[in-house]
Image (cartoon, rainbow, N blue to C red):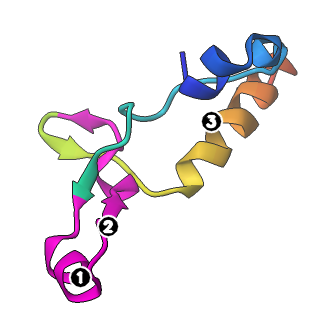
Amino acid sequence: VPPLFKAHPTLKAIPYISLGIYPTPVEPCETLSAQLGVRLAIKQDGKAGPFVDGKQLFSGNKRRKLEFLLADAKRHGCT
């Protein structure tokens, strides 16, 4: 269950198919953090896609939109 649905249970009525690995990895950006004097981190959507036989099928932030579009298509009988 995505964190969004945990935080807002009423959204569970929206069709959804998980296509990724959650939570998305977040990595510290130490060099830039040191230069700016603040703590920065990078959300690595490129590392959150599913793997089959050791190869990543797809990744990136557009996968999130596709999770809802494919679930809605399936709900409407598309194959």
Is 78 on the left or on the right of 70, as rendered? Answer: right
Secondary structure of the residue carrying numbered label 2? loop
In the foreground, 52 or 6: 6
**Image location of residue 18, percent across then percent down:** 52, 26
Crowd rating for badge 3 (residues with CA inside 10 Å; few <14, some 14–19, many 20+): some
Three-letter amino acid code at disc 2? Leu
**Image location of residue 5, percent across then percent down:** 66, 19
Q: Residue at x 42, y 35 (%)?
A: 20
The residue that label 1 is drawn on is: 32
Residue 49: name its quadrant: top left
Mark 2 or mark 1: name the one nearer the start of the chain. 1
Query: What quarter of the picture does the C terminus occupy?
Result: top right
Q: Which residues are magenta?
A: 28-52
Residue 51: name its quadrant: top left
The residue that label 2 is drawn on is: 40
Is 20 on the left or on the right of 56, as rendered? Answer: right
The residue that label 3 is drawn on is: 67
Q: Residue at x 18, y 45 (%)?
A: 55
Q: Is residue 29 magenta?
A: yes
